[in-house]
Image (spheres, rainbow, N blue to C red):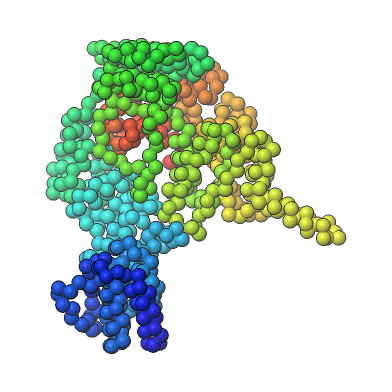
Amino acid sequence: MRRALSLLLVGISASLLSGCGSTPQTTRAPVNAPVQQSAPKVEADLVLTPAMMVAKAQDIWQQTGSRSMRNAFLLDAAEAWLADGESAKASQIVYMLRDEVELPEQQNRYHLLIADLYRNDVKVGSSQRLAILQSVNTADPQIEQHKLSLMAVEYARLGQWLAAANALLSSDDSNAEHVSTAWQWVNQASQKELENSARFSKLPAYVSLRQLILEHGFEPEQLKQQLARFQQVFRDHPLVNNWPDHLSNIEQLGQSSRENIVVMLPLSGRLEVTGTAIKEGILAAYFNDASTMNATVIPQLHFVDTVGTSADELATAASDTDWIIGPLLKENVDALLPKLNPQQRILTLNRPETSEQVIEPDSEREEIMPGSFATQVYYALAPEDEARQLAERVFTQGRRSPILVASENTLHQRMQDAFLQRWQLLTRGLAASQHSAPTLVTYSDNNTLREGILEALDVAQSKDRIKEIQSFADVEVYNLARNRRDIDAVVVFTSPEQTELVNPVIEASISPFGGVTVPVFATSRSIDYVQSRNQWRDLDNLHFLDMPWVLPGNPAQTLARQSEQLWPQRPTPLQRLFAFGVDAYDLLPRLNSMAWLPQLEYRGLTGNLSVNQQNEIVRSLPEAVVSQERVQVLAE
């Protein structure tokens, strides 16, 4: 056995040394020498390269046969090579040591090496790496710190934000960068997670600060007092010593004037109906605005038709206003923004071409950065946002192998691409064996839609196999086609009419022998309440996202009744545009706070609204399901 190990070590040493030049790549000396035996003394001024460490390990093994002393040098070499980006060389040592490490502290270092080495390997998931890291039990503060920092990364990849923040702070809670990152992660946790945060010993102050902001964020004076009290209660706490930048100048936070508001909409031409629905929503919010009842100056609304109006004319119309709402069309937004004074406040009803939804960094989600006053905020009913949120809902519910069904329509293809981008980020913490890339079905008409679904579910292949069996049998074969067993969700980007066709096809294609129902997920673009009232039976088990305004339990019942009286049987798309107008007006006095404090959400008719780092309004929509021909809103 010893001779075999010697030969193996010589081979590895030769292969590693053959790739090394004469210039040292690191200046690292052996650490964590074993307790039982002492390693030969090394001159203090002698710098050992990783290759020299390997050679030293070989000499010690041949001369003394000491496994622990040999392993100490090999672990040092592997750690040094990994630090220098030479993962292939580090892997060779890890492979050689897989059954050779016996001392507890060396086992700890070995497990850290494995977790570090495979931190970006798609074949190994975050859960597996966390299991390895949790096996490390050491009194060495340096090893413990490294372990916790690695665990923080893995928890973040899994979207376990509080666990990630707690691990990072446990590694070093005095580090200003750690405090900042932990604060961002705590702000990304859901309210449900916050309710169960007591088990994280490092987070009480962070959770308390976030809750304080959520409770008083729209009341600047009250918030200022509460923050001062918080700093007294938690004085000398790392979070207070590294106070978030956007909370330092909170006295500047306040409501902006809105005495004069100009609204820019297409009020004639082909988009007249669209613009009019938004206008009616803005007017409804204006006459419903209780805050103006006791105001000394009543806000003045001025509507401008953007059809046939140049960007210069729009800029002139807005020159003496406090706020601009609109324009609606992207080309008008792009043309107007450069012509505005930097101090002019505008809430556009579309995103400019230069504003793109950020693809989240390594923490898997967009960072909540220090706020600032935003003079230009972009509010849009972007279909891509719904597709991204749908990906999160499907993933959160434990679905890992979805089918994506999308028509060749450009809008549906954009939504599919947005879903795929978010899905790729969400699954980064999983091993390749724990999920599969979504199966794509693209169709052009009803026939290709049905064929595509049957092929994706493997039903078509099952039927072909049945026919082949029947051709060899002399008697009648009783059969039932079976679908793929790995599919656990179907996501559709289709029109309302096509959705009513898709759902029955999927239901009929799922084999009853599995005993598992495969849910279908959709966005609001696939639902029309007026059209579907008599056809909910065809949409049974359909899960979808939509704005609160059109769902059961509408939060503005009085306004809903008034709207129904004034515009009975209004088409669903126009109902959503009406709510869009209501929220656009109601957001104005809140935008300063929302842009300055990204944690804040306004519960509007179009969803829970917040402002992201790009000054875009982000909508979080509730999920509903069709069950027994009725729409039911699911709990968060």
Left or right: residue 594 versus residue 476 is left
In this rendering, does residue 220 appear at all? yes
Dividing the image into 4 quarters, which one contains the C terminus?
A: top left
Residue 557 location, x and y as percent? 44, 24
Dividing the image into 4 quarters, which one contains the N terminus?
A: bottom left
Eyeballing the image, is 151 above or below 537?
below
Left or right: residue 503 versus residue 550 is right
Task: Out of 186 and 379, give the one closest to the viewer.
Answer: 379
Residue 334 location, x and y as percent? 39, 24
Residue 155 location, x and y as percent? 36, 55
Q: Residue furthest right?
A: 474
What is the quadrant of residue 80 in the picture? bottom left
Question: What residue is drawn where x is 23% and y is 73%?
Answer: 48
Question: What residue is drawn where x is 22% and y is 65%?
Answer: 142
Question: What residue is drawn where x is 32% and y is 23%?
Answer: 338
Q: Residue furthest front?
A: 22
Eyeballing the image, is 185 above or below 126?
above
What is the quadrant of residue 583 in the picture? top left
What is the quadrant of residue 499 in the picture? top right
Residue 101 location, x and y as percent? 34, 77
